[in-house]
Amino acid sequence: MQPIQTQATHMKINFLCTQHRNWLSHQPDEALKCCARYSETGWQLNQQQRWKDALPYMGCAYETASIILSTEALAPDDAREWLMHTLSGLTQTLIKLNHLEVCEYIYEGTMDLLRKEPADSPTSKFNITRQINQLARELRQLRYPGSEISTPTQRLTQSQWSTNVH
């Protein structure tokens, strides 16, 4: 697991090392297992309010979910739900650690990623648009506290998400 790295004009955030990222890209079944394991550990640490300890797990879960989305290891709607679930954990952790600039960057990057997703049906297009709109609301709340919502929403409960893993 890698730390957050930032540069003055260009932010680069990596939680997975290059070798691990490449390996997961070529092992979709392992990516699913790793994503579930990272996410579960991260959520457990968050529940214990161990934000610093949770951050690398949440970051790795999010990056792995991005890989899952790109490898088509799951149906696109399911892969996007994994991405949204892991994003929720990561952003909640970043907010607790007061890494708001990094959180904004991740929200923007995720919205860009979703905008590039193919919408092969009206339902997929609707779901992608809904997800982007949700993230835009959360980003607005982050930038302008006191508006619509107070914290990122956990899109799936842990038990619902665990059900989708199997």
Image (tube, rainbow, N blue to C red):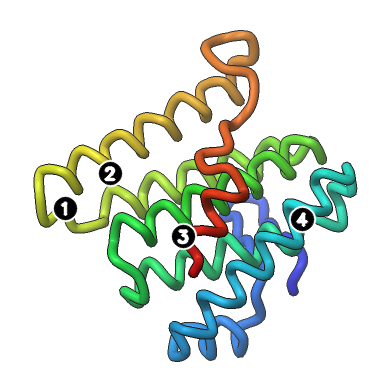
Residue placed under numbered mark 4 in the picture: 55
Distance in Å between CA atoms under marks 1 and 2 = 8 Å
Distance in Å between CA atoms under marks 1 and 4 = 31 Å
| N-terminal-most mark, 3 or 2 | 2
Where residue 142 appears, as percent x and y from the top left, is 61, 25
The residue closer to the viewer here, 10 or 51, is 51
Examine the image and state in which quarter residue 96 appears. top right
| N-terminal-most mark, 1 or 4 | 4
Mark 2: amino acid: Ile
Per the rendering, the mark at residue 49 is: none
Query: What residue is shown at x 48% (from left), y 48% (from top)?
Result: 84
Distance in Å between CA atoms under marks 3 and 1 = 21 Å
Q: Is residue 64 left or right of residue 68?
A: right
Query: What residue is shown at x 65% (from left), y 67% (from top)?
Result: 60
Residue placed under numbered mark 2 in the picture: 128
Asked if the residues shown at circle 3 and circle 1 are in contact, with their CB atoms under 8 angstroms apart, the answer is no
Distance in Å between CA atoms under marks 3 and 2 = 19 Å
Mark 4: amino acid: Leu
| N-terminal-most mark, 2 or 4 | 4
Residue placed under numbered mark 3 in the picture: 164
Circle 3 SS class: helix
The residue closer to the viewer here, 44 or 15, is 44
Circle 2 SS class: helix
Where residue 30 appears, as percent x and y from the top left, is 54, 85
- Neighbourhood count class around disc 1 (C-alpha, 10 Å): few under 14, some 14–19, many 20 upward: some
Mark 1: amino acid: Ala
Residue placed under numbered mark 1 in the picture: 119
